[in-house]
Image (spheres, rainbow, N blue to C red):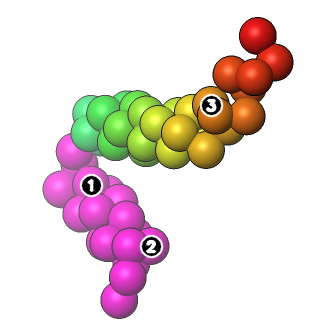
Amino acid sequence: MGKLGTLKELFEFMKKRKKYWLAPIIILLILLIFLIIFTETIGPFIYPLI
């Protein structure tokens, strides 16, 4: 199924069980993951510019 299938299943669970309060937590976790990945890939290239 993959990672996108897991996210789709999670959002279907929230919709069915009326657990909308979980959405902000999940969105913040996803943004944090992207921030960590972005800083790890871009960080070494920014360091020589300082």
SS for callout 2 = helix
User: Disc 1 designates what residue?
Assistant: 14
User: Is 30 colored magenta in this rendering?
Assistant: no
CA distance separating discs 1 and 2: 15 Å
For disc 2, the marked residue is 4
Are the residues flagged by discs 1 and 2 in contact, CB closer than 8 Å? no
**Residue that lies at the very extreme toward the front in this rendered image:** 48
Dot 2 alpha-carbon crowd within 10 angstroms: few under 14, some 14 to 19, many 20 or more: few
Q: Quadrant of residue 41?
A: top right
The label on residue 43 is: 3
Q: Is residue 41 left or right of residue 15?
A: right
Taking 12 as reference, is 33 above or below it? above
Magenta segment: 1-19
Rendering quarter of residue 28: top left
- The residue at 28%/63% (across/down) is 10
> In this view of the protein, which residue sits in the foreground, 7 or 17?
7
Tag nearer the camera, 3 or 1: 3
User: Considering only order in the chain, which callout, 2 or 1, is on the residue closer to the N terminus?
Assistant: 2
Instruction: Residue 49 in the image: state x and y as whole percent.
Output: 81, 18
Residue 39 spot, x, y in % from top left = 57, 33
> Is residue 23 visible to the viewer in this orientation of the structure?
no
Q: Nearer the viewer, mark 3 or mark 2?
A: 3
In percent of the image, x 31 and y 33: which residue is there?
A: 25
Measured in 3D between alpha carbons, the distance from the residue under mark 3 to the one under mark 1, in whole angstroms, is: 36 Å
User: Which numbered circle lies on residue 39?
Assistant: none
